[in-house]
Image (cartoon, rainbow, N blue to C red):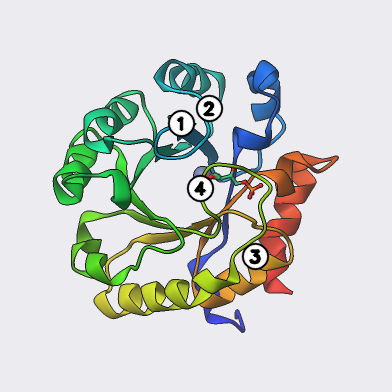
Amino acid sequence: MPHHAEHSRGIHIHPSILSADFARLAEELARIRNADAVHVDVMDNHFVPNLTLGLPVVQAIRRATELPLDVHLMIQDADRWAPDYAEAGAESVTFHAEAAGAPIRLARELRSHGAKAGMALKPATAVEPYLDMLEELDLLLLMTVEPGFGGQPFLDVVLPKIRRAREALDGSGVPVALQVDGGVTRDTIMRAAEAGADVFVAGSAVYGAEDPEAAIDELRSAPLR
Ligand code: DX5
Ligand code: ZN
């Protein structure tokens, strides 16, 4: 019998390959076999001041692992590009609310392509304007760093928003995963889990470790301590 409410929600760990060696992606994917999914950060140097990878690399990753792909699009004009990632076989495709012209239409389009629909909010974007569209989503990502780079410190200022989102989700009863991304470590994961998150992206905490699979297990059990 879990003694914290968050345990009944489960703890899902999605390592971010942003912190992996991009020249050896297949090997790096083989080092996280116990992950719940692999988080793939797509950046276009417009929505964020960094450039990573795009559709051809996501297609190659799809062929190189059996893990589900959790694609996080940090790109402008998400309406135009996001459906291609669903078509490429991503389990979930997450666009930024700040970069979507028609988020409800886009979420429906992603679902129609067979993907889970995710929507992300930057740390300073309020969740309240989006609470009425939760049933259009399978995943809500609350960024706990300013998107663009791995290895930044967790922003505790986002914790109240995580709590408010959790209350809204529990109140409405719609089954939306509540994901946090940025600065997740063995220390900060407890605070995010207590606030109500149930999916945790971790880049440097996994790939910066000597043994990434052990790091995943430690993150998964950290909120239980
Ligand atoms: C940042 C990316 C994150 C990043 C997290 O914009 O969205 O997924 O990889 O890296 P860490 O866990 O090192 O903060
Ligand atoms: Zn990310």
Which residue is nearer to you in this view: 16 or 122? 122
- Taking the image as shown, residue 68 lies to the left or right of residue 17, namely left
> Would you identify the image quadrant in which residue 25 lies?
top right
Asked which secondary structure carries label 2, the reply is loop
Give the CA distance from mark 2 to mark 3. 25 Å
| Residue underneath mark 4 | 147
- Of helix, strand and loop, which one carries label 1? loop
x, y (%) of residue 217?
73, 53
- Badge nearest the viewer, 4 or 3: 4
Mark toward the start of the polypeptide (1 vs 2): 1
Residue located beneath label 2 in the image: 52
Quick one: 36 or 149, which is closer to the camera? Answer: 149
Does label 4 or label 2 sit earlier along the sequence?
Answer: 2
* Mark number displayed over residue 176: none
Q: Using the numbered discs, state the Cα–Cα distance from disc 3 to disc 1 in whole angstroms.
A: 28 Å
Which amino acid is tagged 3?
Ile
Q: Which mark is residue 189?
A: 3
- In the picture, measured across the screen, residue 187 lies left or right of residue 115, that is right
Q: Three-letter amino acid code at disc 1?
A: Asn
At a point 40% along the width and 39% down the height, the residue shown is 47
Q: Secondary structure at mark 4?
A: loop
Q: In the image, is the residue at mark 4 within 8 Å of ligand 1 by its beta carbon? A: yes
Up/down of 133 relative to 165, above or below = above
Q: Amino acid at mark 2?
A: Thr
Q: Earlier in the sequence, mark 4 or mark 1?
A: 1
When the figure is inspected, residue 223 is found, relative to residue 71, above or below; the finding is below
Label 3 environment density (alpha carbons within 10 Å; few <14, some 14–19, many ≥20): many
Q: Position of residue 197 (x, y in %)?
A: 50, 67
Residue 41 horizontal side relative to residue 137, left or right = right
Q: Amino acid at mark 4?
A: Pro
